[in-house]
Image (spheres, rainbow, N blue to C red):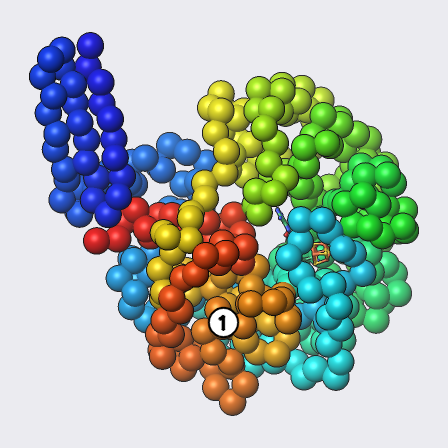
Amino acid sequence: MTVLDWKVSHTLSATMTLGKLSLSFSFSPLVTSIIMRMLFQHTPYWKTLEPIIASGAMDAAIKGEYRYPHRINIYPGTSCMFECVFCGRNYDVKIKDNVNVFRQVIEQDDGVDPYRINISGGLEPLTSPHINDICRDLHAKGYKSRMITNGFLLNDKTLDKNPYINSLDHIRVSLYGVDNRETVSTTRHQKGWGVVRDNLRKYNLRNDKTRLFLNYVLLPEHYNRLDSIVDYIDHIGGVENLSLREDFTFQYEIDERSKLRDSLLSFNDKMRDMEVEIDYGYSLQQLINGEETTLTRVTHQELRPRQSPQVKICVDPRGEIYSYLEAGFVDRPGALRHSHGNIIGSSIEQELMKKKSIPPMEGDTQYLDAFNHLILKYIHLNSR
Ligand SMILES: C[S@@+](CC[C@H](N)C(=O)[O-])C[C@H]1O[C@@H](n2cnc3c(N)ncnc32)[C@H](O)[C@@H]1O
Ligand code: SF4
């Protein structure tokens, strides 16, 4: 029998056991990098990794060299009405009288990549007094941007006051429950369920609208009620795309993987007749493919002081730049240490040229989302 035992550290080594004979070998960094590519190549992670590698941003991040970010998320929200159990935001924050720092981000970008800049949070983007100006500036420069929102303020009043919201490429609404009980237990908001569902139903009836996407985070006590999403989508009049995700903080990991797989397969069958594109993300797609895996994650020992601003950053309403995307929540305890600089009176380029070094500490993984975990793992595995 041939047994291959792979050990992955800064270089890759393998031990092959052939009967009584045991052979060990390690590979050069170049071969390690090729093998690493191959390991990810046939997984759902590759869809994310491939364009980043092709752009050169990954190589710059591995080498710790300056490179203008491949992607920029702007976080314009000044507060949030929900208190989602898995969200790392500071519940007490309410920013007052903030200037629109995002005009500068859009002006200073070369505009070559229409997918570079997107709107998310941070907090809830529709609470920003500048949301119309931000969407107008993005539209004027030809970006195909998306906004991620909890949908609570996505009503006719907001849309009539901020008509450029509908000039975005699409709006992705985060669905925090398939019924009132689940929404209250996830968001701690008593009216969230009814208000958001009504907003989405009315949104679909508007003449002036953009593409509507939905995102649902599966939690251990809720994953077996996935079928209710079919009724929800039906009730609101349809969505173009539905993404399903797991909690990337790993506090609400679903242990019963085979039951989760059965639930996903049955859901997939039920959705077959609906004209909705389904995006299962990383680990759920692997489950559907028959692999019992969980989300890729890095440990704090695998993090590097330069982080990965070459790949993606976010900018908060005060102008702070972060590459750890969950550090962009204003006044999140401990997050400011991860700022790569402030753009006010400066620029993303000028600040990132300083190549700030932030020594990793235990607990830093709380500031990472699923995207960060993947990119930082890839960088770690490919570092010499
Ligand atoms: C942080 S929210 C900010 C935008 C807006 N407030 C919202 O909730 O849509 C951005 C996206 O991250 C998702 N998210 C937040 N915490 C998460 C977690 N621990 N695991 C998976 N997704 C999460 C949310 O569901 C949402 O779709
Ligand atoms: S995930 Fe979004 S809606 Fe939920 S608390 Fe965080 S910022 Fe608010």
- To which residue does mark 1 refer? 337
Is label 1's Cβ within 8 Å of ligand 1? no
- Where residue 224 sits, quadrant-wise, is top right
Q: Secondary structure at mark 1?
A: helix
Residue found 47% across the figure and 64% down from its top:
323
Q: Is residue 245 visible?
A: no
Q: In this image, 367 relative to 350: left or right?
A: right
**Residue 140, image x, y percentages:** 61, 73
Residue farthest along the front direction in this orientation = 362
Residue found 60% across the figure and 36% down from its top:
253
Q: Quadrant of the N terminus?
A: top left
**Residue 228, image x, y percentages:** 79, 29
In this view, 133 is above or below 196? below
Q: Quadrant of ligand 2?
A: bottom right
Q: In this image, 104 relative to 71: left or right?
A: right
Between 214 and 93, the one lying in front of the other is 93
**Residue 22, image x, y percentages:** 12, 21
In this view, 1 is above or below 50? above
Q: In this image, 364 relative to 180: left or right?
A: left
**Number of marks in the rendered image:** 1
**Residue 362, image x, y percentages:** 45, 57
The amino acid on which the numbered mark 1 sits, given as a three-letter code, is: Arg
Between 168 and 118, the one lying in front of the other is 118
Q: Is residue 133 visible?
A: yes
